[in-house]
Every structure is written in structure tokens, then in C-alpha cells.
Amino acid sequence: MAQSDSRSATVTSAYAIVTCLFFAWGFITSLVDPLVAAVKGIFQLSDVEAQLSASAFFIAYGVMSLPAAVLLSRKKAVSTVLIALGLMVAGCLIMLAAANIAEYPLVLLGLFVLASGITILQVAANPLAAALGPPERSHFRLTFSQTFNSLGTFIGPYLGAVLFLKGVEVKEGTAITDAVREQSLLGIDRAFFWIAGLIILVGVVIWMGRRVISASAPATSDETARRGVLATLRDAASSPWALFGGLAIFLYVGAEVAIGTQMAFFLNSDRVWGVPLENAAKYVSLYWGGAMIGRLVGSALLTRVPAPALLATFTGAAAAMCLYVFAVGGVSAGYVALSIGLFNSIMFPVIFTITLERSTASEEATSGFLCFSIIGGAAIPPLVGLVSQNSDYVTAFIVPALCYAMLCFFAVSAGRARLPRETMAREALEPAPVEP
């Protein structure tokens, strides 16, 4: 009994430490939203060019996820996390250099390196959080950890608006002064200096808790550890559900990021609220704050409601809200758009765990492929930027509406599918065919 209690306490401690990582990468990722608005003004960019900031960040998931899966299988969780944090610090240092010499291409490089570290971190931390406890509670654990990720994304946009967007305007006919430009660049410099310090602090916590995490992490087979990137990709591609889940993650992240990075411009638009850009960017915190509240509520609902059913409800609601914004516009559309975050809340963790449950590929390959699919955050925002550039920010909501509609189809399909272990149990009970 005492040994069981000790094991439970160890797993709980490991889970608490890993959850700190979710806060850190949520905070950093959400700074991309005000950064997109800032660089549009600082460097006089078009909507599509400004959205390249989001693309540079999220394309790292396409480049690094499968190598990260291989790294995780060979180096195990703690070493992989520490490597990821080191890469994130390097990205922050590049961002410091970019802010000091005012070079947009260097901003894109810094965001790519920073996101490469976050990619590796997610490949390691998502399945680890799901695995640290009873299997039947995996949806709850990952969603609860993602709540702390949402706490970071709630704080990040507001802080970024204060630091990056003081006096910055991007409406047609407005110009940014040298003083405002320098102040915005100084804000970027300060933000990434302190972020580097935060990452180093998290690294120290992980190092101090390395034995607890290692003792609680799921074991990896020797066969999986010997695989390379191509073998890992083949493993993931062998499972239809890994591919289907990858498509779902691609669409979800693309829609969520596109809405977040365009939200400040959307609220700044005269067709919606027409507020100054800095104030509009502060309101973006409410979009991400809704996700935090939704994850708290969703964590409780997932203990009572089947995950696919809850996902179908949330994705259907998000699709309907995007269609409202597209069809109606105006002041009310601003409130509806900000509320979409509430329904985004459970999508990533539930898609992730639904896919892990149904995939016949290894956990490392499936996790790596799902994180690879976050590249949707690089592909869909420029598409939304292209639509808004050729029409307006209200019309552009038709793109995420279509993404959410397809996610609703994924959820309904998952609810009807039989889990692999259920299929194997059924086959085991069926009598063997008798030869004539």
C-alpha cells in the first residue's frame, strides 16, 4: 500500500513539473499575435507579408516534429526537453539581435529557431502528460495541462500589446514615426530577453526534477529507438487514424492561429469596432482567455461526456460562430469572434488523445506526426491574409469556418470508430474459421 502511494506521489510530481512546460510555450507562442501586428507597422508590410511571421514560427513544426520524435525515442524525455529549451534560448538571442539591427528576415529566423525548440518540447511533453496516470484519464490530464498553456496564451497577447504596439497604427493612410518604431523594437528586445530568462529557469526546474520525470515516463522499446526519420514517418503513415488526426491538427491549428493573428486587425477595422491597434491587440487576450476557461470547463466535462461527442459540439459551435462573423459583421461580430476561443479550448488535446487511442502506429511516431501537422499554423494564416487583403477582415472568417466544419466531421467519425484494442478483443473472441 505504501509503495503504491509513493508511486502515485511520484507520478503526480512529474505531472506538475511537466505542466510548467505547457505554460511556458503557451506564453511564448501567443506573443506571435501582437508581433504580427507590430512588424506590419514597423516594416510597412502587407497582410500576407506580416503573416509570414506566423508562418516562420509554425513551419518549424513541419521541419522538426519527426526528427523530434526520433530524438525522443533515443534520448528519452528529460534530455529531449532540455535540448528543446536550449534551442528556445538560442531563438530568443536571435530575436534580440533582430530587434537591435531592425532586420525583418532575422525576425523570421529567430521565430523559426524558437519554434523549433517548442516543437521538440511539445513532441516530448504532450504524450508524457497523457501517460502520467491511469489511461482512462488521459483526455482529462492533457486537457488540464493545456489549461496552463492557455494561462500563458492569456497573458502573452496583453503584455505583447503593451510592449510592441504603443502608438503603432496600420490603417491605410497612417504612418509610423521613427520614435514609435524605436519604442516598438525596444519592447521586442525586452520581451525576448526576459523570455530567455524564463526558459532558463524552467530548464533548472526540469533538471532538478529529472529523476522524478524519468521514473514516471513511459518506456520506449529498443526497436522504436533505432528508427530514423523516414522509418518514423512510414510508421505514422501506416495508420489511417494517425493521418486523419494529422489532418485534424493541421486544420485546427491553422484556424486558431489565423484568427488570433488577424484578431487585432479585425477589431481595429472600421467594419467591426474601429479601436486603436494597441487596444485591439489587448482584446486578443480575451480570445486566448476563453480557451483557458473552456479547458477548465472541458476538463470537468470530459470526466462525464465522451471525448468525440464533446469535440463535435465544440467544433460545430466554432464553425457556426465564424459563419455569423462572415455573414453579419459589425460590433456584435467582434464579441462573437473573441468568444471562438472558448470553443477552441479542448480541440488540440482531445484530437491528440483521440488519435493516440485509435492509431495503430507507435506512440512516438503518432505524436511526432501530430506535431508535424501543426504546420497548419504556417499554411492557413497566409491564406486568410490573402483573403483579407483582397476583401476585408470580416470576409476572411469563411476560411476558419470551413476548417471547423471539417473538424466536426473528424469528431463524428471518431465517435463511430472502434478502438484498436476493442477490435483485437472482438477478433480474439470470434471462433477461428473451420477449413472445409
Image (cartoon, rainbow, N blue to C red):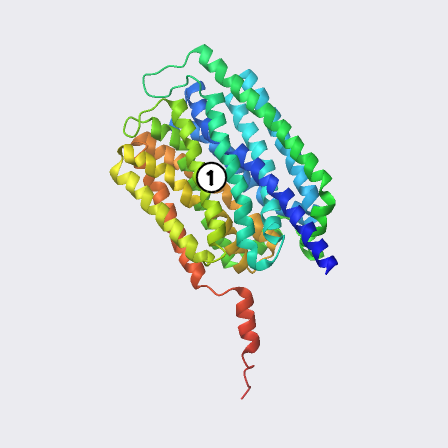
| 200 relative to 22, above or below | above
Between 62 and 245, the residue placed more toward the observer is 245
Residue 161: give x, y in percent of width and height.
46, 24
Q: Quadrant of residue 84?
A: top right
Pick out the residue farthest to the front.
Answer: 2
Query: Which residue is depicted at the point 46% across and 49% down?
Result: 298
In percent of the image, x 55 and y 24: which residue is there?
A: 191
Instruction: Decide: few, some or many residues near mark 1? Use Cα within 10 Å; few <14, some 14-19, many ≥20.
Output: many
Q: Is residue 31 visible?
A: no
Give the left or right position of residue 234, taking residue 181 as reference.
Answer: right
Q: Relative to 93, is 333 above or below? A: below
Q: What residue type is disc 1 on?
A: Gly
Please indicate, yes or no, whether residue 78 appears anywhere in the rendered image: yes
Q: Outermost residue toward the left?
A: 328
User: Which residue was labeled with disc 1?
Assistant: 377
Looking at this rendering, what residue extends furthest in the bottom direction? 436
Q: Position of residue 325 (x, y in %)?
A: 30, 39
Please state, as top left, top right, bottom left or bottom right, where the N terminus lies in the image. bottom right
Q: In the displayed structure, does residue 305 sit left or right of residue 171?
A: right
30 or 61, nearer to the observer: 30
The percent position of residue 247, horizontal first and vertical second, equals 46, 50
Q: Position of residue 242 (x, y in %)?
A: 52, 55
**Left or right of 405 in this view: 205:** right
Across the whole image, how many numbered discs are drawn on residues?
1
Residue found 43% across the figure and 31% down from its top: 51
Secondary structure at numbered mark 1: helix
